[in-house]
Amino acid sequence: MKITMLIVMFLFIGAFFIISQNNLSLNTHENINKFVSDYTGWLGNLFENAGALTGYVIKMKWLPQPNIPADE
């Protein structure tokens, strides 16, 4: 339940940042369309970046490498 609330709060904070940065009042149809367009674009970028980060983490070497002495 706590994780769900954190995700919802994160999404609301993102929406408030979009509204404040674009100075939208959301009382006209044009402003609502602009907000929806910006918000869906932000969500798309969020998922794209999360996918890229996940791919990068998966490719990392997490296990220690054996310490093999070099032949002299």
Image: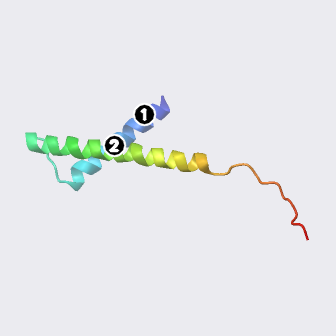
Please, what is the three-letter code of the amino acid marked with disc 1? Met
SS label for mark 2: helix
Residue 24 rendering spot, x and y as whole percentages:
16, 49
Q: Nearer the viewer, residue 36 or 60?
A: 60
User: Residue at left 40%, top 43%?
Assistant: 47
SS label for mark 1: helix
Q: Earlier in the sequence, mark 1 or mark 2?
A: 1
In the displayed structure, 1 sits above or below 23; it is above
Residue 7 rendering spot, x and y as whole percentages:
42, 37
Q: Nearer the viewer, residue 65 or 22?
A: 65
27 left or right of 20 in image: left
Q: Residue 5 carries which label?
A: 1
Residue at the outermost top position: 1
Q: How far apart are marks 1 and 2 (CA)?
A: 17 Å
User: Residue at left 23%, top 52%?
Assistant: 20
Q: How is the image coloured?
A: rainbow
Q: Dot 1, how many residues are within 10 Å of its Cα: few (below 14), some (14-19), or many (20+)?
A: few
The quadrant holding residue 12 is top left
Residue 61 rendering spot, x and y as whole percentages:
67, 51
Residue 63 rendering spot, x and y as whole percentages:
73, 49
The quadrant holding residue 72 is bottom right
Please, what is the three-letter code of the amino acid marked with disc 2? Leu
Residue 65 visible in the picture: yes
- The residue tagged 2 is 43
Residue 13 visible in the picture: no
User: Residue at left 21%, top 43%?
Assistant: 37
Q: Dot 2, how many residues are within 10 Å of its Cα: few (below 14), some (14-19), or many (20+)?
A: few
User: Residue at left 50%, top 49%?
Assistant: 53
Q: Nearer the viewer, mark 1 or mark 2?
A: 2
